[in-house]
Amino acid sequence: MSNQSINSLYIEAISWLRDMGCDEPINDIQRTFYGLRSKENISEVHFNNINIKSKSIKSSIDSIDHINDLHNYLRLNLFPNDTNLYSKFVFFDGYEEADLMIIGDKPNSLDIKIGKPFQGEIGNLLNAMLKAISFNRSNTYFTNINFYNTDIEIDVSLQIVNKQIEIVKPKIIVLLGAEATKRLLKTDKGIFQTRGKWFDMKNLITNSVLPCISMFHPRYVLAHPHSKKETWSDLKAIRDKLT
């Protein structure tokens, strides 16, 4: 079986497990899964023609000190010959030296069209939320744990997010929604258990610890207006933490 076929099976299996609610391995013992998984070790994942080695990307971005340099590195190395894929790449928006960093899950179709995260109704609501505590696009940094419109290898995404945190050096991080909270805090608790609580988040690159708060994603607030009360409470906690 070719590497491409093997990786296609990996992607299908992982997607199926994710849809079933599995978000972490039980252990590292290799299994056959009735022929679904090969016994050979595969150190890289091929996804939509993107070939990314999770171990190599950390060393490649170690010396990068500026967000635009990181952006250019990803553009040149992840999408060297495919402008269509690069056109769907949504990286960041806002101020590169912000005290406040917002991290969501993944870009939506309008984000992809414009090329920046948190656009449309979601962005308008987020802008209004931040304005209420004297923050906006000019003094806040915005990104997602996935910079593509569908999942790639999570270890790669987390390395890139942690590199952004290292460069920006925010004082506070806001995790919007369950996926960002679970991935970055390495927890299996749902958003109703984490929302409104403060956590110490360890950066994978620097080992530094930053305070972060878990909040409802604006997507959820739009669909459930009754959650505005909790959201306002969280925003006030952020404001108080930064003053």
Image (cartoon, rainbow, N blue to C red):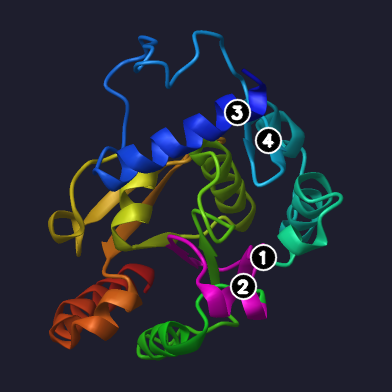
Q: How far apart are marks 3 and 1 (CA)?
A: 24 Å
N-terminal label among 3 and 1: 3
Query: As shown in the figure, which amino acid type bears the numbered disc 3?
Result: Ser
Judge whether 81 appears above or below 92 on screen: above
Secondary structure of residue under mark 1 = loop
**Between 82 and 202, the one nearer to me in the picture:** 82
Residue to which mark 1 is pinned: 88
Instruction: Give the magenta part as a residue range.
Output: 89-114
Q: Distance between the residues labelled 2 and 3?
A: 28 Å
Residue to which mark 4 is pinned: 52
Q: Quadrant of residue 137?
A: bottom right
Judge whether 70 appears above or below 41 on screen: below
Query: As shown in the figure, which amino acid type bears the numbered disc 1?
Result: Lys
**Between 46 and 243, the one nearer to me in the picture:** 46
Residue 185 position in % (x across, y down): 33, 44
Q: In this view, does 1 lie to the left or right of 144?
A: right
Q: Distance between the residues labelled 4 and 2?
A: 21 Å
Q: How crowded is mark 1: few (under 14 residues within 10 Å), some or many (20 or more)?
A: many
N-terminal label among 1 and 2: 1
Query: As shown in the figure, which amino acid type bears the numbered disc 4?
Result: Ile
User: Which mark is nearer the camera, 3 or 1?
Assistant: 3
Q: How crowded is mark 3: few (under 14 residues within 10 Å), some or many (20 or more)?
A: few
Does the CB distance between marks 1 and 2 fall below 8 Å? Answer: yes
User: Which mark is nearer the camera, 4 or 3?
Assistant: 3
